[in-house]
């Protein structure tokens, strides 16, 4: 199978520093793919000359004359934006490999670079904490630096920092004399301040050289500067500055070592940067997608099939595991912060504990979960429960799905809350005033399923009601039909369902006319349907794709340890309000709840809380002895349960980048207490501030530099945290270390 692929890079002009490397990385990947798979890529290369107008022309010509379906490339946001009209007109796709300002979701673009919460925010926060809260903003004069700096300014000022100066330079500018003159008037060359740079292209090496030539020792901090630009200046001008990226050439992963070696073998000892790695990864991503797209049974064009498949891909690239967020078509990204060393490479000083999901809404959405009320059914979401990033991501996707009428597939273990999420999606949608019809697939008798779903006319069969009966589809018309445990649906009924979804028509048994229906289907299962599809499998592939326009996979409760206490409190509140009581958990009880494995997930937790509530009789405290035995015994003496628990946490932590399997968490009750009498003799204890600073540092890292979350973990207000951060950063020696 031969596929033409469009490559659109800046091979001339100011961005060619990066563009030439991207082309080489793309060609390397294409050679690898053409050697090792039945697929052959035939690349058509365009040069956008670092100019948005030229990019628009080239893109249009690649899609129409070149007949490509997919384009990989574009660096500057202005170039990406100019290409969008070609995407709209031709239906082609763009894989965009560059960090950008966020706030864009175009259905034909897959955003492979970072958005602000994945790179810029962690970098700012690290800088605030480790260097200074005084910022000088410099950028090239186009859309990305200006919109990014709007966010940076807000972030810095909200945090109690200062923006001393904000300057923009024309693309390709290499003369910074006036800027350094202005800066000298404002601040001393060795002051506690950082220069935050969103300069691009040939301006980058020129600027870094000028910083030192003008006698400034301020660090330049940049989410854009890469190994590529650094290679063009000597080590004196480049070393010590700070950069952030999902990828550095020095990243120590097996896949990266292979990539760097292959690149060097092919193109010699050149610096490799994130756009090159992303472009290389994009080609392999496309190869995998083309292979899968051939199995997609619907979709009128290749690009539409590719879009369906690309949304669902998750792969291991040189940067580590990469997950595509299907709702926004952005990647989860690692964030590494590093200091440039004498060789122009990067020594990593901080890494996110795992890939960070892309965030589009600001402020961070609170998560809300439905509340059960026996009298009035299910309420609209109210109390925010859950801060676990994977869970938040599920809710965010549910919120996006809620705004559409697309079908949704919710997967996850029994008890993880699939039914609740389905109702939540229904309630926040415009269908909320219409019915929510629930069908439990395993509990409808096999021979009645058709009449249950489609209904029947009077006298259609022996025993049928005279007046006939509407089926679940008819009852759910205009609203949502929830198909619980869809994996249990027999194959012939799957075919029926597929027809209803596709034709939007139902036929009552014994009837002669079809009736039109407008239904959103939400299906749920605890089975891995993708393993049960295909030849000999029990689930229809075409139905799976029809149902999983949005696919939300709910994490197990043991993968959301940080949410257990809040959920337990929530269930306890329900018990309290029913009984008119005000019970609370003893701290040791909550600890035990957090350490248990919860094979039955949230549902098991709800049951345990209710049982303990009743067992505690008149006591106002729910103590450990009110909990079921398996929970109390679970962690005593680091028994089997404890080890299993640690290892299950390890699975979660693999994703979140926390300690690997087998590394047990220290007992947190003990950790909070000093190990014994303290030794107060001179110099034996760390200073209180040092301990505080270390606790803050760890809270920031655990929260991926989300200040609100860090403040919550620390049990202090945001403004207190800002004040402390500011104090520690001011006390630190600014630069260089
Ligand atoms: C950019 O313009 N997105 C770097």
Image: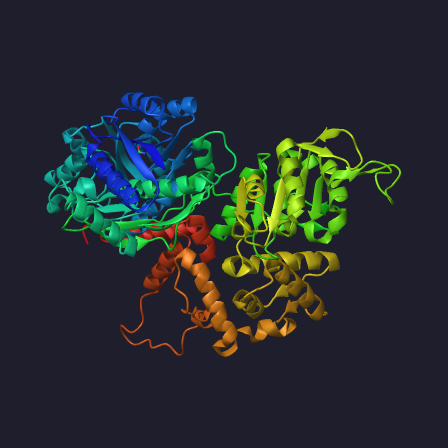
Please give the name of the residue rendered at 62% of the width and 62% of the height, measured from the top-left corner.
605
Above or below residue 387? Residue 584 is below
Give how far across and how far down residue 673 sits, in percent: 44, 72
Q: Position of residue 99 (x, y in %)?
A: 33, 38
Q: Does residue 240 appear left or right of residue 462 in this picture? A: left
Nearer to the camera, 127 or 192:
127
Q: Which quarter of the picture shows residue 41? A: top left
Q: Nearer the viewer, residue 401 or 192?
A: 401
- Picture coordinates of residue 700 (x, y %)? 38, 54
- When the figure is inspected, residue 333 is found, relative to residue 562, above or below; the finding is above
Q: Residue at x 29, y 53 (%)?
A: 255
Q: How many marks?
A: 0
Give ligand 1's quarter of the image. Answer: top left
Image x and y of residue 312, in percent? 46, 43
- From the viewer's side, name the closer residue of 413 and 141: 413
Above-or-below relation of 734 to 693: above
| Position above or below: 23 against 669 | above
Asked whether residue 107 is in view, the answer is no
Whether residue 164 is visible: yes
| Front residue of 299 and 237 | 299
Q: Quadrant of the N terminus?
A: top left
Left or right, 140 with reference to 356: left
Q: Residue furthest right?
A: 466
Which color scheme did the rendering employ for the protein?
rainbow
Name the image quarter holding the C terminus: bottom left
Q: Quadrant of residue 556?
A: bottom right
């Amino acid at each position: 199978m031969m596929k033409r692929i469009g490559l659109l890079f800046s091979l001339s002009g100011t961005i060619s520093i990066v563009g030439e490397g991207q082309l080489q990385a793309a060609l390397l990947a294409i050679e690898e793919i053409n050697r090792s798979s039945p697929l052959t890529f035939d690349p058509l290369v365009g040069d956008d000359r670092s100019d948005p107008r030229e990019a628009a022309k080239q893109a249009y010509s690649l899609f129409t004359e070149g007949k490509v379906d997919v384009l990989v490339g574009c660096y500057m946001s202005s170039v990406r934006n100019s290409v969008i009209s070609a995407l709209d007109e031709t239906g082609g796709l763009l894989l965009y490999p560059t960090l950008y300002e966020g706030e864009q979701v175009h259905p034909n673009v897959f955003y492979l670079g970072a958005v602000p919460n994945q790179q810029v925010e962690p970098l700012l926060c690290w800088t605030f904490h480790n260097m200074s809260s005084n910022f000088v903003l410099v950028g090239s004069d186009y859309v990305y630096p200006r919109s990014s700096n709007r966010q940076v300014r807000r972030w810095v000022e909200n945090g109690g920092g200062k923006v001393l100066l904000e300057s923009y330079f024309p693309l390709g500018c290499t003369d910074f004399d006036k800027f350094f003159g202005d800066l000298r008037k404002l601040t001393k060359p060795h002051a506690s301040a950082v220069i935050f740079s969103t300069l691009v292209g040939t301006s980058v090496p020129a600027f870094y050289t000028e910083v030192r030539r003008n006698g400034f020792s301020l660090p330049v901090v940049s989410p854009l500067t890469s190994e590529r630009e650094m290679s063009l200046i000597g080590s004196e001008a480049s070393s010590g500055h700070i950069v952030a990226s999902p990828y550095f050439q020095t990243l120590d992963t097996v896949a990266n070592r292979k990539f760097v070696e292959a690149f060097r073998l092919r193109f010699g000892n050149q610096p490799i940067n994130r756009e090159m790695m992303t472009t290389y990864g994009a080609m392999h991503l496309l190869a995998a997608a083309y292979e899968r797209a051939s199995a997609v049974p619907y979709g009128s064009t290749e690009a539409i099939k590719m879009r369906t498949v690309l949304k669902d891909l998750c792969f291991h690239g040189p940067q580590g595991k990469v997950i595509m967020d299907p709702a926004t078509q952005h990647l989860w990204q690692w964030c590494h912060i590093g200091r440039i060393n004498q060789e122009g490479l990067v020594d990593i000083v901080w890494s996110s504990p795992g890939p960070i999901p892309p965030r589009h809404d600001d402020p961070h959405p609170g998560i809300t979960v439905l509340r059960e009320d026996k009298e009035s059914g299910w309420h609209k979401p109210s109390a925010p429960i859950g801060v676990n990033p994977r869970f938040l991501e599920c809710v965010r996707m549910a919120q996006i799905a809620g705004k559409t009428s697309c079908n949704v597939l919710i997967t996850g273990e029994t008890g993880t809350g699939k039914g609740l999420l389905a109702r939540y999606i229904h309630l926040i949608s415009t269908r909320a005033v219409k019915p929510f019809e629930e069908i439990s697939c395993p509990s409808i008798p096999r021979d009645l399923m058709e009449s249950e779903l489609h209904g029947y006319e009077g006298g259609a069969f022996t025993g049928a009601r005279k007046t006939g009966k509407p089926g679940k589809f008819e009852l759910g018309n205009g609203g949502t039909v929830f198909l619980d445990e869809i994996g249990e649906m027999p194959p012939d009924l799957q075919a029926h369902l597929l027809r209803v979804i596709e034709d939007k028509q139902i036929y009552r048994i014994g009837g002669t006319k079809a009736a039109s229906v407008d239904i959103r289907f939400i299906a749920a299962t605890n089975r891995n349907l993708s393993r049960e599809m295909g030849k000999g499998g029990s689930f229809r592939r075409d139905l799976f794709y029809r149902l999983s326009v949005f696919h939300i996979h709910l994490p197990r409760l043991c993968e959301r340890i940080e949410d257990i206490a809040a959920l337990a409190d929530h269930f306890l509140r329900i018990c309290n309000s029913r009984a008119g009581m005000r019970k609370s958990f003893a701290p040791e009880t909550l600890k035990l709840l957090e350490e248990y494995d919860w094979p039955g997930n949230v549902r098991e937790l709800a049951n345990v809380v209710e049982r303990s509530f009743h067992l505690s009789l008149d006591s106002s405290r729910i103590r450990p002895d009110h909990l079921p035995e398996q929970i109390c015994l679970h962690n005593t003496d680091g028994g089997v349960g404890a080890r299993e628990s640690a290892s299950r946490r390890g699975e979660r932590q693999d994703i979140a980048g926390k300690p690997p399997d087998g590394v047990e968490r220290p007992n947190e009750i003990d950790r909070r207490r000093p190990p014994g009498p303290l030794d107060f003799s001179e110099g034996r204890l760390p200073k209180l501030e040092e301990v505080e600073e270390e606790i803050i540092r760890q809270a920031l890292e655990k929260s991926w530099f989300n200040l609100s979350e860090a403040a919550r973990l620390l049990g202090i207000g945001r403004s207190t945290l800002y004040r402390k951060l500011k104090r520690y950063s001011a006390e630190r020696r600014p630069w260089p270390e």
